[in-house]
Amino acid sequence: MSQQGLESYRRPTGRFGRDFRYFREVGSTNDVALAAARSGAAEGLVVIADRQSKGRGRLQRRWEAPVGSSLLMSLLFRPPDPFAYFAERITMVCGLSLVLAVGAVTGVAARLKWPNDLIHEAVDAPGDWLKLAGMLSEVVLSDAGQPVALVVGLGVNVNVAAGDLPDLAPNAGSLSVLTGAEVSRVDLLDMFLGETESRYADLLCGVDPVPAWREQLAWLGRPVVVHAADGIIQGIAEDIDAEGALVLRLPGGGTRRFLAGDVSLRPIGC
Ligand code: ADP
């Protein structure tokens, strides 16, 4: 296991991480990467911090992380056209790469919680889950309003001690709690960047990551509740459609689609 600190991490070969910007503290790594993108930074920039004072999730929710415990990072992509097609799949590539890197470095069997979280589910208690990481993708627009870059932010609970996130109990978990040992953030970062780089190269060569991503999704075919703007809706998580929307089978028959931006998903224990 690497004992190296994040501040001295280097990735001299490859596209992602060659421009590596470490900060002891920032507001949010996404904000730093978005500003860098607007100033012309190249694809592959990685921004990382040991502390975020304004870490955020979707819908301006807060992302909490004790200092030095986590991987708080943002990656800059400059996808080709059609931008929306690639942007959606880049977020999937990052989620998939995180599942694989976590498995390879820690042995933890993590899965993806649609649309953008990494979770671990207890084998003996379906519905009993811990959130290990969250992802937030944000688009940079040109002055003319055209999308020109995508920033994918990830907050991964690596060495967060049990009880360090009391407000988020009982659903926040960490890799060190699951493995019972400290996990090298450098090893995890290095594996994640390598996976992302090769899967992104595949995507640019025409490989669609949707089937592999779908395989890693938790709770498909299972009873779930969707917390939507108009209330809490129960059903079976039937599928994810071609646009990445959740298709919920309703108890009275019929289905309803939910777009990722608007809703939160939870399982119903059985
Ligand atoms: P969801 O997809 O579950 O609705 P978001 O993607 O919006 O959640 O992420 C933000 C939410 O994640 C916060 O409201 C909080 O409940 C939770 N959260 C914040 N920090 C952490 C953390 N370090 N570990 C696990 N969960 C967190």
Image: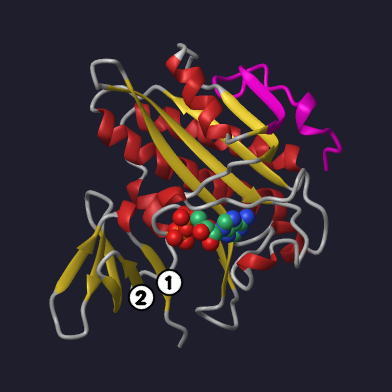
Q: Residue at x 54, y 20 (%)?
A: 15
Name the element at disc 2. strand
Compared to residue 127, the image places residue 100 above or below, namely: above
The answer as to whether callout 1 falls within 8 Å of ligand 1 is yes
Badge 1 density bin: few <14, some 14–19, many ≥20, Cα 10 Å: some
Indicate which disc, 2 or 1, sits on the residue closer to the N terminus. 2
Q: CA distance from mark 2 to mark 1?
A: 5 Å
Percent position (x, y) of residue 106? Answer: 71, 54
Q: Is residue 12 magenta?
A: yes
Compared to residue 185, the image places residue 254 above or below, namely: below
Dividing the picture into quarters, in which one does residue 204 lie?
top left
Dividing the picture into quarters, in which one does residue 125 lie?
bottom right
Q: Which residue is mark 2?
A: 225
Q: Which residues are magenta?
A: 1-25
In this rendering, position of residue 201 left or right of residue 31: left
Compared to residue 195, the image places residue 168 above or below, namely: below
Q: Residue at x 47, y 12 (%)?
A: 39
Mark 2 residue type: Val
Q: Looking at the image, can residue 207 be seen?
A: no
Tell me the tag on residue 184: none
Mark 1 residue type: Arg
Compared to residue 44, the image places residue 1 above or below, namely: below
Quadrant where the N terminus lies?
A: top right
Percent position (x, y) of residue 72? Answer: 63, 40
Tell me the tag on residue 266: 1
